[in-house]
Amino acid sequence: MANRTVGESIVGMLVNAGVARVYGIAGDSLNAITDAIFDRQDITWVPMRHEEAGAFAAGAEAHLTGRLCVCAGSCGPGHLHLINGLYDCHRSRVPVLAIAAHVPSAEIGSAYFQETHPERLFVECSHFCETVTRPQQLPRLLEIAMQTAIAKSGVSVLIIPGDVALQRASAAAPRVTIAYGASAVRPSDDRIAEAARLLNQAAKVTILAGAGCRDAHASLLAIADRLAAPVVHSMRGKEFVEHHNPFDVGMTGLLGFSSGYLAMKACDTLLMLGTDFPYQQFYPEKAATVQVDIRGEQLGRRTRLDLGIVGDVRTTLEALVPLLTIKQDRRHLEAALAHYAEARGSLDQLATDRGDTGAVHPQYLAAMLDAHAPDDAIFTCDVGTPTVWAARYLKMNGRRRLLGSFVHGSMANALPQAIGAQLAHPARKVIALSGDGGLAMLMGDLLTLNQIGAPVKVAVFNNASLGFVQLEMRAAGLLDRGVALTNPDFARIAEASGMLGISVPTAADVAPAIQRALAHDGPALLDVRVRTQELVMPPSLQLEQVGGFALYLARAVLSGRGDEVIDLAKTNLRA
């Protein structure tokens, strides 16, 4: 080690920890790191076009593999570009290490060219953020950074001045071996017994299940059966809860179904399992609530609790289920399932080819992507309406995966997350459901797809607007101003980037275009013109939303935009 540079030592430690690639943009303050990577065969530098995209890609890989993934940014602007992607990684609780190169160590504090204060910048989107000022701090600081990211499932940032990374490394030997695997956390017998008492005395139990149910599918079904409880899932829980689940009644919240909303409102006891579902207005007002979460700080954060239990979901349910009395009265479950079947049928009717010659209904595009994608496909979706259509029309089966910016809610996540997903699973089909606004924000990384040969398939929901923002404005009674987008021909941009680009103007073109893209041996983009005026109805309409939308209609007519009202009616009303 004494003959190696600090940069070479860092890269060697990353390889020993199982890191296969580093996402970033080369810069002079990163030279020691990138040179060390290029000199090896067991780790790859992934050349992104934006550091934010690199952080999103690393986060996607970490989400799918559960292992530490790495991104890097050069000093100053590189730090700032990383931040949004790192916020998403941190709030999504995936283990990511960010290497933030810094200005020369002798210049720190002098307002040097490109200087920032990274310890301040990254403090809110990391569990660990420290600066290497001399070689003797390694390997210990890097080990702490990696261990923290893995143990706390979040971001660690290691700040390294470019000149320090070029110095000779310390002769200190590594101190720890990086290990993976979560420990089981079992609540006390008293807590388990109290939960059983509350659930046994309840007449109508509904389960709200989130991403914490990832390894607890069998136990979730067992407790739902004993309690005769419908299961409502969160967006992050969809990929882990929905599949092969006879008790599933869909989602609630702004993206969800009326069946999920009513199943929660109708219960007298709500059992929350591994979820931090944020929207308080969708919780039942009078029901008793039992919450299980491995993070004690989340208990009672969203709704009043009768009992909070710290524990991982699977271990807790395995201890709880034997203490539960089998409920003979299953009318609450049966009513919720009947309502779900009705809601599901109504949504499916909207996702059919209506023989229209104009722009495509976005529900139909999402349904066709679901129908033609392989059983082990990995989907990513942009925030806004692509997330709505993914929530409602992509079917999870236990093998498929679904990623998005479901907590941080950032635009432009789908494309870079698809890059990380494809590199993590090169043999699987990766499909990005991109909004036109989201794609345009980080469109430069279409070039990355071609450069690295990642055969990602990008479906652009091109409605020429910031669609979800438009709906929010209308629901508030406002004219939707500032949301219209003048878009290019994305298919031609894809072709110019070296990809297959396909324009999809009508519903009749959707299925052939999807089949062609999936069969193509390389990256492909579908530019699908979807209807701008398609409404996304929440599972429950509040009085102020109804009044707000009526006010929007009146304002639209009075301001000379009556043609939009007519188009809105034609798009959403069926004979």
Image (cartoon, helix red, strand yellow):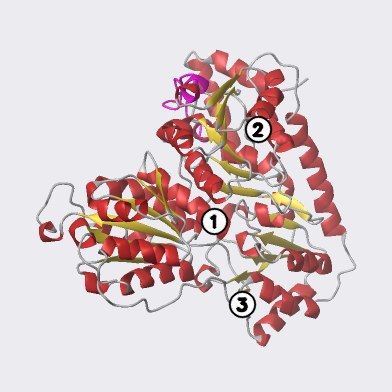
**CB under 8 Å between discs 3 and 1:** no
Q: Mark 2–mark 1 contact, CB under 8 Å?
A: no
Point out the tag, 2 or 1, that comes first from the N-terminus. Answer: 1
The residue under the point 87% across, 62% down is 330
The amino acid type found where label 1 is placed reads: His
Identify residue for label 3.
Answer: 184
Q: Is residue 549 left or right of residue 28?
A: right
For residue 463, which quarter of the picture? top right
Q: Which residue is mark 1?
A: 63
**Kind of residue indicated by mark 3:** Ala
- Mark 1, secondary structure of its residue: helix
Mark 3 nearby-residue class (10 Å; few <14, some 14–19, many ≥20)? few
Total of numbered circles in the picture?
3
Q: Indicate whether residue 476 is drawn in magenta.
A: yes
Tell me if I can see residue 475 in this picture: no
Residue located at (23% from left, 74% from top): 136
Residue shown at the point (50%, 16%) measured from the top left: 558
The three-letter code of the residue at mark 2 reads Leu
Q: Earlier in the sequence, mark 3 or mark 2?
A: 3
Label 3 sits on a secondary structure element that is loop
Q: Which residues are magenta?
A: 472-494
Q: In the picture, which quadrant includes the C terminus? A: top right
Residue 449 position, x and y percent, is 48, 36
